[in-house]
Image (cartoon, rainbow, N blue to C red):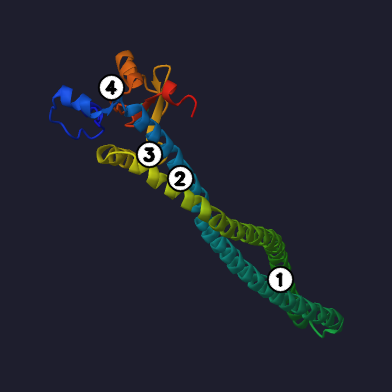
């Protein structure tokens, strides 16, 4: 087995080999004929890529759920905290409303009394004092009315927000239950599928020699489930960069392993896997 040196992403194995001995490695002696064996290797790599893609997909589907569940729990907690705050705000407003209304009622009673008194005054001074008291009571009453209007608006806003928060909280709760159920289901469902994929992966890897196995694992480490790419109409299907025509022919002959100079994926000619 061999890997084209200058195609390796990290330029491993830079020393030159005897081209003859290098080629021999790819051939298997069968009934007196030297037969290339790399197509089979490339097909194994292609199958491995599909297996790893499935495994990556499973992880991706599950991987999102624990985070989502955690975030929903935080959202519910925040909504509950805000609802509690709003409840306290409304309680405080209602307490103040009652106090102000009571105060205004007392002011009305007092001013009525003053009104009666002002017709029975003995002198101007007494009259002026009554009028001064009435004015100051009116002023308090006016301020109270103004404050009542303000806190009424605040109460309405808080109540509106509370309704929206209750609705959001219920939605978060429903989504949390659904996500938790889904994660449980996926964990159960994928347990067998994952087990089977890992078994298949192991048996495929066993068909490769150590160098090719290491090359595949290294590329799969950074491009999980995408370690191989198809050469289609002169382009790498992984990154869409063009493959030089001479290289394309060599990839098709499949006597060596080539990786894409741009993305580092192992290149396989489309014709080798067109039925796969
Ligand atoms: Zn590429």
Identify the residue under disc 4.
33
Q: Secondary structure at mark 2?
A: helix
- Secondary structure under tag 4 reads strand
What is the x, y in percent for residue 131? 76, 76
Identify which residue, 95 or 247, lies in the foreground.
247
State the CA–CA distance, disc 4 to disc 3: 37 Å
- Residue 221 seen in render: no
Question: With respect to residue 129, does 23 lie above or below?
Answer: above
Q: Which residue is mark 2?
A: 56
Q: Which is nearer the eye, 165 or 41?
A: 41
Quarter occupied by the N terminus: top left
Q: Residue furthest front?
A: 31
Q: Residue at x 30, y 24 (%)?
A: 35
Q: Could you say whether the residue bearing mark 1 is in a helix, strand or loop?
A: helix
* Mark 1 touches mark 3? (CB < 8 Å): no
- Mark carried by residue 182: none
Of the numbered discs 4 and 2, the one sitting upstream in the chain is 4
Kindly identify the residue that appears in the image at 34 percent across and 43 percent down.
206
Marks 1 and 3, how far apart at CA: 70 Å
Report, in whole angstroms, how far the alpha carbon at label 1 lies from the one at label 4.
Answer: 106 Å
Ligand 1 within 8 Å, label 2 CB: no
Residue indicated by mark 1: 144
Q: Quadrant of residue 241?
A: top left
The picture places residue 234, in percent across and down from the top left corner, at 39, 17
Q: What residue would you read off at disc 3?
A: 223
**First of labels 1, 3 by sequence position:** 1
């Amino acid at each position: 087995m061999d890997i084209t040196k200058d195609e390796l992403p990290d330029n491993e194995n830079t020393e030159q080999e005897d081209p003859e001995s290098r080629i021999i490695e790819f051939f298997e002696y069968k009934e007196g004929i030297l037969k290339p064996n790399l197509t089979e290797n490339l097909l194994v790599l292609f199958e491995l890529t599909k297996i790893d893609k499935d495994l990556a997909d499973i992880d991706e589907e599950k991987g999102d759920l624990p985070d989502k569940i955690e975030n929903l729990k935080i959202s519910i907690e925040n909504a509950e905290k805000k609802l509690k705050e709003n409840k306290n705000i409304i309680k405080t407003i209602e307490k103040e409303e009652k106090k102000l209304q009571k105060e205004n009622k007392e002011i009305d009673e007092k001013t009525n009394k003053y009104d009666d008194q002002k017709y029975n005054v003995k002198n101007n001074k007494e009259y002026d004092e009554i009028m001064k008291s009435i004015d100051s009571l009116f002023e308090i009453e006016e301020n109270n009315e103004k404050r009542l209007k303000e806190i009424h608006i605040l109460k309405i806003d808080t109540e509106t927000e509370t309704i929206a928060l209750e609705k959001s909280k219920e939605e978060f709760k429903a989504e949390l239950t659904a996500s938790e159920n889904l994660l449980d289901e996926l964990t159960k469902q994928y347990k067998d599928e994952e087990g089977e994929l890992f078994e298949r992966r192991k048996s495929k890897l066993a068909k490769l020699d150590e160098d090719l196995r290491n090359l595949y694992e290294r590329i799969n480490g950074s491009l999980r489930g995408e370690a191989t790419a198809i050469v289609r109409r002169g382009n790498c299907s992984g990154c869409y960069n063009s493959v030089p025509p001479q290289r394309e022919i060599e990839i098709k002959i499949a006597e060596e392993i080539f990786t894409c100079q741009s993305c580092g994926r192992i290149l396989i000619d489309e014709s080798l896997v067109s039925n796969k």
